[in-house]
Every structure is written in structure tokens, then in C-alpha cells.
Image: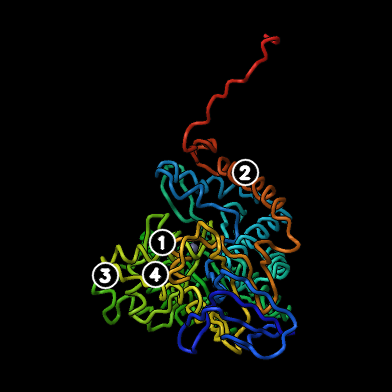
Amino acid sequence: MYKKISARYVLGSDGTQHTLIEDGEVVFDGDSIVFVGRNYAGPVDEERDYGQSLVMPGLIDLDALADIDHLILDSWSSPEVAAGHLWSDDYFANRRRDVFTPPERSVVRKFALAQLALHGITTYMPIASEIHSSWAEGYDELVDMAETSRRIGLRGYLGPAYRSGVHVTTATGDRAVHFDEALGLAGLRDAERFMDHAAGLEDPLITGAFLPCRIETLSEDLMRETARIARERDALVRLHCLQSPLEDEFLQRSAGRGVLELLDFTGLFGTRLLIPHAVVIDGADAVASAPGGPLETLARHGVSIVHCPMTSFRYQKQLVSFDRFRTAGINLCLGTDSFPPDLVRGMDVGMHLTRMIEGRPDAGALADYFNAATLGGARALGRADLGRLAPGMQADITVVSLGHFGDGVVEDPLRTLVLNGTARQVTDTFVAGRPVVVDGALPGIDLDALRVEGQRLFDRMRAAYSGRDVQFREPDVLFPPTYPHAEVAVAVAVNDR
Ligand SMILES: [Zn+2]
């Protein structure tokens, strides 16, 4: 079935780069694009004109929040309170539990994936917060998530998060990583099992990937086994690392080596590796890009860096710098990592941080950022058929409205979107030609009910921090409100006095 969509602006591709077509059209047949340009002459079965909108390649989020929220709780706390956000070692040893039942976890996923879709993301690789699970993610949980993902219609690269260690606050208030090797290896078995399950679905929208937790929570054996199996299966591995100076300290203690050395030593550099964050590397230091330095090493091993500008920014970190990583030949892609899963705002923050770091107004070019959100993501996934709109490519499309008065004027549609707007202007998306977001809604999903349910589960999640805190502090102490809640005088009718 041929479907034609048109709009005031279409971001097509000339084969080497994105190109802007005014009053453009995209025609797709099933999951593939057959035409991008103007005045398509052939017959079509269906057509829709989106008017004052930008039709662009679907956004690729490779560190996509698969949870309700956590940044709203933990990105702004004092060190004293922050220690209480981690598990206490007593909780680790004696009282670990799942905050949510499996059906509730399922709702959490639905909430998160609906958010991704509504923010214009068409391809994602999830990141969960394991803090409210009794350990990490299991096979069943991911099987269920894959079903939710398929129902919504997103393109997912999925796998259970697994780890052999957990960050804890000890009774003396220190930070440590406590290990349980057996649970780590069981997690890897689950990940392998899920890979088989994903392959068995024979659904082009679901691909298995190895998504272990942060590097300092993996034992050396777990890293080595992950690398071995991933190479055997030619599978993607995403490993959070190079995000905190603490990593090296912990790894020296548990494995006697630092991050880059371990990636090499365990064979992880030999996998199709994605690394979110990389904010501990100082790319401005000449040593970083010298042969054998971190930038050169990452480039040589073909590592993709998943840059999550807004999340890094909100945790007081930044990539130094996007431009330096790019010119070092490192593939850059983007991630949201926390709420809101808004790559438009992410690009805005990233561009401006890059300008600050480089001290030049022309640093952090929007084209480079948009390339990362599309082509860079596709490259990281090894998908030459994603990330751009051209004949033969997958029909993964995001439509953004520029028609609201508040959007201001269009000088260049992408510039207007990123400088003036947000991803909430997304009205429609298609994944493999199938409509996912339609007129700002998700057909078949009651968003009002999902919002209410999400709030209820989030409130429970927030309350559960108290039982894990080494000092059992109340939620309002762990997460002090912006202003104190007022003592509201209750009006009493005169007659009742
Ligand atoms: Zn992350």
C-alpha cells in the first residue's frame, strides 16, 4: 500500500547528508520509503498533508529511559541526603525486595515507552533504574517489555540489565560496591535467553542486545563472559562507563585495573560497543587525543559514544567536548537517559554546552547534533537503512508541528524547532511505515489513565527510598520540597463554631 505524506518542510537526504525540501513529500510502501521529493507522479492509496510541519527521520535514543522518572528525585540533592538514595548495606544483605509486582512493572514500561513514542523517538535502547528491584532485570520482565514495545510499535534494541554488584552506603556512611557473583552470571544467562527469545519473535522491530549495568557493578568475569558471548553472537553491547571518576577507584579495588584497560583486557573493545556518557574524559587535554590516549583508543576500537546532554548537564557533567570527540573520529549518537525523553531539548542543551566549552558560537553545530540523533544512532546499531529519509530506507518518520503561535517564526525549521521548541511538538510518527503516534495520541492507549497510574506507582517508588536509606529518613527529608507545604487553615462555617 502506497502512502504519501507531505508537509511545508521535509528533511530528505542526498545520499551523503540530510537536505531540506520545502513543500516536500515522502511516499512509502509497507515498511520502506519509495520516494522523497516533490510532485510524486504515481498513484497512492492514502495521503495526508501535515501543513506547517517538519517531516524528519525518526529520532534514535540509545539510552532511553524505561522507567517513570528518577532524575526528578536524585539530581539535585545535598551529599548528605544523596547517600540515603542508595541501598544501605543492611538492605543489600537482609531486606532486598521488589517495589513493584510484575504487572506494575509492566505499567511502568508502558508509561516509559509511551513517553518515548510521544517525544518522537522511533528507535530506542532502554535504560532502566534497578534501584527499586530486588537485584536487576530478569528474563520475564524483558519478555513482557518486548510485548509492550510491539503493541506500541517502536523499534527496540532490548535486553535485561544485569550486574554482579550494587552501590551501597555502608553503616559508616561510606560508599561501596557489594558483589554477588552468582546473581551477575544468572543475569547474563537471562540476557542470553532473551536474545534467543527476541530472535524467535522474528519481528524486525525487536532485536536483542547485551545491556549490563554500570561497569563498576560488573565483576571482571562478568565483563569477560559478556564480551565472549556478544562476539560469538555478533551482538551489540552497551556498557555505562566513563561517567564518574569513582569508577576507576572501584575497579582498581575489584579488578586491579581502570576502565579503558578493562575494556581492552576483558575483550569488550572487541564487541560492537556503545558507551553512554564518557564525561570523565577531558578531550581538551592534548593527551586525550594523542596516540594511545582515550579519544584515539575509543576511535580505534570503533566505539560509539551515547551522548546524553540534558541528563549529564543536570547531573553537573558535560562531554568535553562533542566537537573534539567527533573530530577524533568517534561515532556519536544521542540518548535521553532520564525524563523528559526529549532529544530536541537535549540537542539544545548539548549545542550550548559545547559552545561554552569551546568558547566559540559556531561550535556544537546543530547539523552535527541532528546527525548524532539520526545517522550516528543508525551507525551505532549497524543499520544503514535507518536515520535518513531516502528511497530504500525504512519508513521511520517523525512529524513535528511548527504551526503553534508560540513556536515563533521559521528561519530554518530545525533551528526553530531546537531553539524555540521541544519534542512535545511531535504530532505523528511512523515506524517501519506503521503509524505509532497519531495526532499527538497513541491509538489504543488511554493516556489519562496511564498518567494517573504512573503517578500512583511513582509515589510508591518515592516512598520506598525510606526503607533503603541507611538512616530510614522520611521521603520529605530525602527529597525536600521546593517550599515547605503550607499548613492550610481549614475554613469552618460560622454556624459550626
Ligand atoms: Zn545513562
- Of callouts 2 and 4, which one flags the residue occurring earlier in the amino acid sequence? 4
Task: Tell me the residue that label 4 is attached to.
Answer: 259
Circle 3 residue: 284
Give the residue drawn at x 68%, y 68%.
Answer: 149
SS at mark 1 in the image = helix
Does the residue at mark 2 contact the one at mark 1 (Cβ under 8 Å)? no
Q: Does the residue labelled 1 lie within 8 Å of ligand 1?
A: no
Q: Nearer the viewer, residue 228 or 366?
A: 366
Q: Is residue 105 above or below residue 230?
A: above
Give the position of the C terminus as an image quadrant: top right
Residue on which disc 2 sits: 459
Q: Earlier in the sequence, mark 3 or mark 1?
A: 3
Give the numbered dot on residue 349: 1
**Please, what is the three-letter code of the amino acid marked with disc 2?**
Asp
Among numbered discs 3 and 4, the one appearing first in the sequence:
4
Q: Residue 386, position in %: x, y?
A: 57, 81
